[in-house]
Image (cartoon, rainbow, N blue to C red):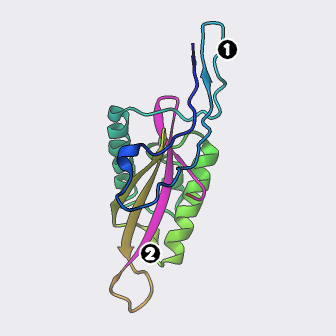
């Protein structure tokens, strides 16, 4: 079975009165050829397409992760070894990279004892099939002397769906 699509032109009913008729540019689209003897196309990426239910699972999983950040001391070995935080990362290297980046953000923002007091998800952004970003605000007490107010860090994390689960993927969004 072959499907071949050609160029397009503006239909006559779209012509405006008293305006010259302008031809629309032609667009070349690829032809799609399929059949039983065609080999299955190779997967370009390991990222999976997510259904509506899987996207809902993503929202729940991401919200749970950010809640787990609250009240933990990120400049300690105990938080680094926490299996509950590691389960959101596909491997140890991804967890280590994310943890180091978060701990550095908290230190630069002068979080008291590197402890986030609250987290709030500002925005969920679905970039495409199996890819999303989360904009989150992490707040805590300011640890500098004579500063009685709070401090905060705005982060944007990338998530990808692989092997049937949503994972945090460290790095630039």
Q: Is 136 covered by the magenta stretch?
A: no
> Closer to the camera, 2 or 51?
2
> Closer to the camera, 123 or 14?
14
Q: Are marks 1 and 2 in contact (CB under 8 Å)?
A: no
Please report the bounds of the magenta region as a residue range: 151-172
> Closer to the camera, 112 or 9?
9
Residue at disc 2, secondary structure: loop
Name the quadrant containing residue 92: top right
Q: Is residue 39 in view?
A: yes
In this view, the mark in front (1 or 2): 1
Residue 91 vs 23, above or below: the answer is: above
The residue carrying mark 1 is 39
Of callouts 1 and 2, which one flags the residue occurring earlier in the amino acid sequence?
1
- In the figure, is residue 2 to the left or right of 133? right
The picture places residue 100, in percent across and down from the top left corner, at 59, 60
The residue carrying mark 2 is 111
The picture places residue 145, in percent across and down from the top left corner, at 43, 89
Residue at disc 1, secondary structure: loop
Residue 103 vs 92, above or below: the answer is: below
Q: Is 166 covered by the magenta stretch?
A: yes
Residue drawn at 38 percent across, 41 percent down: 58
Residue drawn at 55 percent across, 35 percent down: 47
Q: Residue furthest top?
A: 36
The picture places residue 173, in percent across and down from the top left corner, at 55, 57
- In the figure, is residue 123 to the left or right of 100? left
* Residue 153: assigned label: none
- In the figure, is residue 17 to the left or right of 143? left
């Amino acid at each position: 079975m072959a499907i071949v699509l050609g160029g397009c032109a503006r239909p006559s009913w779209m012509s405006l009165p008293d305006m010259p008729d302008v031809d629309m540019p032609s667009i070349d689209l690829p032809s799609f050829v399929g059949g039983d003897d065609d080999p299955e196309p190779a997967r370009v990426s390991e990222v999976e397409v997510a259904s509506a239910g899987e996207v809902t699972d993503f929202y729940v999983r991401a919200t749970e992760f950010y809640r787990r950040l609250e009240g933990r001391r990120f400049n300690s070995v105990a938080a680094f070894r926490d299996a509950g935080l590691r389960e959101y990362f596909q491997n140890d290297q991804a967890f280590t990279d994310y943890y180091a980046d978060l701990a550095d953000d908290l230190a630069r923002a002068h979080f008291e004892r590197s402890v986030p007091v609250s987290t709030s998800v500002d925005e969920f952004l679905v970039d495409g099939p199996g890819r999303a970003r989360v904009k989150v605000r992490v707040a805590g007490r300011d640890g500098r002397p004579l500063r009685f107010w709070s401090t905060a860090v705005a982060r944007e994390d990338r998530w990808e769906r692989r092997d049937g689960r949503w994972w945090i993927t460290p790095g630039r969004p």
